[in-house]
Structures are given as C-alpha cells and as structure tokens.
Image (cartoon, grey):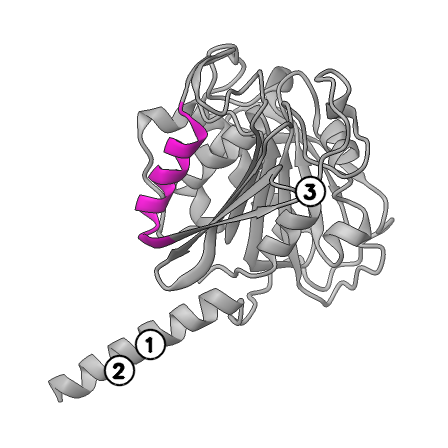
Amino acid sequence: MALHVVLLFFTSICQFAAGFAHGEFTSRASSGCGKTQFFPGITQYRFGLKSSGKDRSYSYHLPSTYDKNEQYPLVLGFHGSSTTGVLFELDTKLSESRFSGQKIMVYPNGIDGSWAGPSYHTGSTVDEDLQFVSDIIADLKSKVCVDEKRIYATGISNGGGFVSTLACSKVGGQFAAFASGSGAFYTDLNGCSPARTPLPFLEVHGGADNTVFYEGGEGEGGLLPSIPSWLEAWAQRNGCTTKAEDDTADNKVHHLSWKCNEVKGLLQHYKVDDMGHCWADTEPNLTQIPVPQGPAPIQASALMMSFFDRFSNP
C-alpha cells in the first residue's frame, strides 16, 4: 500500500513537470466570463480603482476578436520611471495583434510616474504597489474572461525591476512567467522569497546601458546588482542545472538559457552588446531617442510573448 502511494506521488510529479514545460495545463476561467464587452480592439481606461486607500488607474486592451465566452491570457506591462502605461504601450507595441494575439494587455500606472523600490520613488511602498497589482487582477477577472492560470508580467527599467519585485513576492504566485527589459533591480539586493519555484523569467539588457549598468553599481535610485549576478541568483532559486550560450547576430547578441527543474529554457537572458537603456526593438521606438539608440537586432516584444506562451501556472 505504501509503495503504491509513493508511485502515485512520483507519477503526479512527472505529469506536472511535463505539463509545466509545454503549457498543457487546463485553463481556469474568471467570473468575468460571459459578460459583454464594448470596444474590443481599442485601449480603455480604468480610473478610481481604490487600492490601499489610494485612487489608482490602469488601461487595458482586449483583442479585436474578443469572445466573452473564451478565456484569455492576461499580460501586465509596467512602464519605466517618469512615464505612464500609455507610453509603455506605444513604445512596445504590445497591444498590436502581431505580438499579443489573443491576449488581454494591461498597463498599470505607477504613482508619480514610477514604482516602489528605488530611493527616488516616494509615492507608494512596495507593499502598496504589490497590493495594487493584486487589485488590478481581481478587478479585471470580475469584468472580462481571464484564464487565471495564464497571467504574466513584463516591464522596462524601473518597471522591469518591479517585475522582479513582483516575482519575489506572494502576489507573484498568481503569475505564470515574468520578463524584463533593461530592468533596474533595486529590491533584489534585499533578498527574494518567491511564492513558488521554479519561476520562468526572461531578461533582455544592453551591454552599453549607461543608466542601469550591466556590471551593476550605483544607479539613480540606489545600488544595483550586476546582471550576471542577478541571473545567477535566479538560477539558484529555480534549481537550474545547466547553462548554454548561443551567439547570434554577428556576435552582437548573446543568448543564455538555463535548464531548471528539468525544464529547458525556463530562465533566459539576451545581452545586446551595443544597446543602451531602451526597449530592444528592430523598429524605431520612443525609448531609443534619448539614448540615443537605433533599432536593435532583436525584438523584445516578440521574444517575450513567445516565452510566455510556453508556461501555465500550476
């Protein structure tokens, strides 16, 4: 009898690992399924969401072919400092069907244009911003048809750093995978306690970033880890056992991929040698202007959406 129980346990673990690697889990529908939505395909705005006693806001974009009875993945995109969710949407082009496809895109707004973590942010605490994320998800699940097992987060710079803060929190347990572009990981030096492991993570960074240095050091909002040490910390948390490097685009792009808990490519990183502090894009975007920076050899929006498609929340 005891042997039978043990065999059943290990069979369940193997089935979980196989499903995790290939995104084969069944979906879980939210209470918003079946409710009619107006203006799909057009970005809509949500003001006055009460969170931690404060009025917060976000925008969201439903697929133009939205079906009230179909369950959709949810992707939250966090803007960088001194900007807004609308500008992040414009920069990344993530609401375009070629990237988001059949996904609901969400663009939260940080208080005073930034997210908690760096010293320059004073409008909210880390706990308040994490609660805001949880409140957004609850708000949307009650209105639209969300696949609760397929919720993801991405962001740039300060927002990209907040994505890691989110992954290191209990709230992050609601998410299936994470991705950051030019992430400023201020809070990671204070430790990280993910809601579960392993957690899929993809990071894209410029080797010539003069705002969030690849080698780490003092940033605009405090001390930052080097990107290699940040990646190594996530590799340890995720139980990664192997690492492979793949040079592409005439050796200007370096791709690192780890195998973690028997899942290949669960942790990934792209280093673009000559790219500064911007969103990696093969087309022009606004973040390239102040660097100054031309188009990059890789397109972060496409890479991240493809990465998300591989993973479901257990």
Q: What residue type is labelled 1?
A: Ser
- Residue 135's quadrant in the figure? top right
Side of 43 relative to 112 (left or right): right
Mark 2 to mark 3 CA distance (whole Å): 44 Å
Along the line of sight, the residue nearer the viewer: 265 or 116 = 265
**Position of residue 293 measured from the top left corner of the image (x, y, whole percent):** 74, 23
| Label of residue 8 in the image | 2
Seen in the picture, residue 60 relative to 284 is either above or below; the reply is below
Q: Mark 3 points at which residue?
A: 298
Q: Is mark 1 on a helix, strand or loop?
A: helix
**Position of residue 17 measured from the top left corner of the image (x, y, whole percent):** 39, 69
User: Are there few (<14), some (14-19), or many (20+) residues within 10 Å of tag 1?
Assistant: few
Residue found at x 36% / y 55%: 242
Residue 74 makes an appearance in the image? yes
Seen in the picture, residue 210 relative to 269 is either above or below; the reply is above
Mark 1 to mark 2 CA distance (whole Å): 6 Å
User: Are there few (<14), some (14-19), or many (20+) residues within 10 Å of tag 3?
Assistant: some
Side of 262 relative to 102 (left or right): left
Q: Which amino acid does label 3 sit on?
A: Ile
| Label of residue 12 in the image | 1
**First to last magenta residue range:** 225-242
Along the line of sight, the residue nearer the viewer: 227 or 306 = 227
Where, quadrant-wise, is the N terminus in this rendering?
Answer: bottom left
Residue found at x 57% / y 23%: 54
